[in-house]
Amino acid sequence: MGLLNKLDDPYYGGGIILGKVEDILNWGRSKSDWYLQFGLACCAIEFMAMNASHFDFMRFGCIPRTSPRQADFIIISGTVTFKMAERIKTLYEQMAEPKYVISMGSCANSGGPYWEHGYHVLKGVDRIIPVDVYVPGCPPRPEALEEGMIRLQEKINKQAIFNKRKRLAEEEQKELIISN
Amino acid sequence: MQAQEIYEKLKAEFGDAIIEFNAEPFFDPFVRVTTDKLFDICLELRDTPEFDFDYLACLSGMDYKENLGVVYHLYSIKLKHSFVVKVTVSKENPVVPSVERIWRTADWHEREAYDMMGIQFEGHHNLIRILCPYDWEGFPLRKDYVQPDEYHGMKVPY
Ligand code: SF4
């Protein structure tokens, strides 16, 4: 965010932070993401290791929720079968906006080991819900999931909150100029 | 008790219902029996004190290409001996008597064999799919199974 280092001694005299409201909101949003617990297969074991004290997922501000209505993002950790796919879609639709998805492991990314003979496996969860961050591996180590979480935080930090349409249009305009 | 002795005792009692005995090395020794006597043979194996097979370790559905089959792995916890019973049924009429009333373990195992292989267990109290969705079509572990293109609007092939 680069707010504090604009001043030589930011904490002197009660402390002053300069920045945009949007940046502060995004800072809060990205550092307190609550996630919907959703373990599906072997990847969920690695995900549990991530939750335990050694890797400590909570230092990212991530608190597990058991209800989709309280969750900011969902980690699809494991094999998505067709039977489960319909439930995932329902859960995703029940989450409040803004909502994000991390797809963890080859299974959720592309079907993984079941890509050819898995008659019961959805070949990639992105066929039913939009995915923000893909974490590769079978299973990914908790470090990889940490990296994925950092990427998600980066993404949230960059998001526009106010004048979204206007700014998107401006960006498009810029891209047009560059491509021409 | 050795498998040979079990076989001889069963043969003496059930005669033609025991089709085949196989005690080749490297395999678990097994008997192949007819479906109509299967229930009685299983009951005998459980209730006779010298057999005392009180534990159904595994019940598997099989696809032998021309036929379907069911394999029962039995174990006696008290006498520490094991035995295998097999039945074969045709693909057109795959009906096997349920042993669910003998070993309660068989309940879910038979539902799984039905789900994957389409073997009908006669006398099972609740023979519905256990793994696949209830409206799934076909029996996926049969060798001639062709996977569908779509399930509820989701594409199945990669
Ligand atoms: S990606 Fe690998 S570890 Fe993860 S759920 Fe699939 S098979 Fe299991």
Image (cartoon, coloured by chain):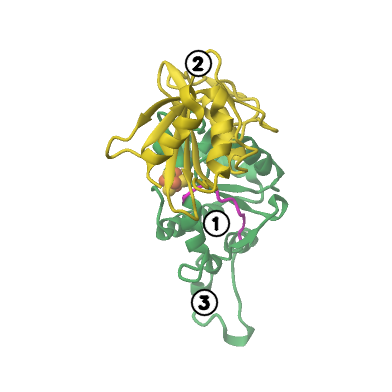
Within 10 Å of disc 3 (Cα), the crowding (few <14, some 14-19, many 20+) is few
Q: How many marks?
A: 3
Whether A36 is drawn above or below B120: the answer is below
Question: Where in the figure is residue B65, as x and y percent of width and height?
Answer: 40, 18
Residue segment shown in magenta: A33-42
User: Going by the image, does B116 lie left or right of B126?
Assistant: left
**Residue drawn at (45%, 18%) of the image:** B67
Question: Is residue A180 visible in this depiction of the protein?
Answer: no
Q: Nearer the viewer, residue B21 or A178?
A: B21
Q: Which residue is mark 1?
A: A157
Q: Amino acid at mark 1?
A: Asn
Name the residue beneath numbered marker 3. Answer: A7
Q: Position of residue B97 (x, y in %)?
A: 60, 27
Q: Are marks 2 and 3 on the same chain?
A: no
Q: Give the chain of mark 3.
A: A
Q: Main secondary structure of the magenta part?
A: loop
Chain letter of the residue beneath label 2 in the structure image: B
The amino acid at mark 2 is Lys
Q: Nearer the viewer, residue A10 or B121?
A: B121
Instruction: Tell me the amino acid under the disc marked 3.
Output: Leu
Tag 2: Cα neighbours inside 10 Å, few (<14), some, or many (≥20)? some
Chain identifier matching the green colour in the rendered picture = A
